[in-house]
Image (tube, rainbow, N blue to C red):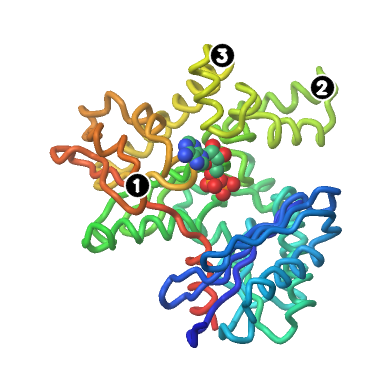
Amino acid sequence: MSSTRTVLVLNSGSSSVKFQLIEPDTGTSVAHGIVERIGDANSTAKLTLGEQELQRDGTIADHEAALRTAFELFREGGGELSDYGLVAVGHRVVHGGRDLYRPTVVDDSVLTAITDLAPMAPLHNPPAALGIEVAQRIMPGLPHVAVFDTAFFHDLPEAAASYAIDRNVAEQWKIRRYGFHGTSHQYVSQQAAVFLGVPLEGLNQIVLHLGNGASASAIVGGRPVDTSMGLTPMEGLVMGTRSGDVDPGLVMYLWRTAQMSVEDIETMLNRKSGVLGLGGKIDFRELHKQIAAGDTDAQLAYDVYIHRLRKYIGAYLALLGTTNVLTFTAGVGENDGAVRRDALSGMAPLGIELDEHLNDSPARGPRIISAERSPTTVLVIPTNEELAIARACIDVL
Ligand code: ADP
């Protein structure tokens, strides 16, 4: 039992809620878990509390039931929230639009604004709004703070933030490149400086956040100068199920010629594309197995993924001129040495050289994987969006 303060961080998706109870001051995770397949007959709730792994299977009807089940598991494990000095609930919200970017205590007008942004993040903002509403109902006495994935990129230079389209249309419909995964890009770039023991202000960095969603950013002195995601979290790198960059003409072509509806095109680009769409697998561990078994579709998926990643790295090397640090993070970036090797192979003339041994090491935690002579230091830094959100909550309070 701890006498320090904690924040409950919630990440609400359409059929899942991830949660973590975290001490913002020490970074200690008290408990974490996930409720999956909400609304399904075979929902599961899992919670890790200290050494204990607790699980409950069976229908969990909705997001409210999901949160209540998580609390029940917490109590089952001997935890009592009131013992942990809970001071706030932090909510990950993907899209904050033009106006919401600072961590914000949620009131009715903020909740309405998050809901109104649904057209720009149809997969993400509606469940986030629902998660906030439910959590406010269950925990009415606590401040609920929304932390936006777009926030870090709010002041992206105009040249990087603007699409070259009719500016009246852009203005009327608030079209710009917002960028996403900002909490992770900010946290990882700050941690890189801490890990290397050098001032953030002096570093030109590239951060590659490679999870199911994937994005890259170029950062000068702690401020982003470009990022690969745009108006929505679909632009840029190839992802688990999202296409990343496509010719916008493709949308009109499918609409007009294949007579696919807007919803069908959206579903195809968001859920049936990327590595899954090309190679049939979403998880890189499975993709590698398929490739080893001679599956040419899986090989193409991997090749397209790496090709796109290298294009973005090249673009950001050019934008930065000098790149001091390049960091891999998130599920694929932290764990998949082959992706890191193939993303950077042959770049010694550009100042990037991996140490194969360090790259292949199964070590965890922040680490250097570049050769000593490499002008650009290459790092692996585990992201911790929950901790960053918890700390943002404390800052705003
Ligand atoms: P999310 O975007 O859902 O937060 P994560 O950052 O957790 O995603 O990344 C999940 C992905 O990371 C998995 O789909 C898988 O492709 C990849 N991954 C996780 N562990 C490994 C591993 N040991 N080797 C290769 N890839 C991994």
Using residue 192 as the reference point, say whether residue 130 is left or right of it: right
Q: Which mark is residue 38?
A: none
Whether residue 223 is visible, yes or no, is yes
Q: Position of residue 373 (x, y in %)?
A: 13, 38
Mark 3 secondary-structure assignment = loop
Amino acid type indicated by mark 3 = Asp
Residue behind mark 2: 256
Q: CA distance from mark 1 to mark 2?
A: 45 Å
Question: Which residue does the image show at 76% across and 66% down from the upper left?
Answer: 69
Q: Residue at x 36, y 56 (%)?
A: 189
- Please give the residue where the numbered disc 1 appears in the rendered image: 380
Mark 1 or 3 closer to N-term? 3
345, above or below 168, in the image: above
For residue 66, what is the image quadrant? Answer: bottom right
Q: Which residue is mark 3?
A: 295
For the residues labelled 1 and 2, say whether their Cβ atoms are less than 8 Å apart.
Answer: no
Lower position in the chain sequence, tag 3 or tag 2: 2
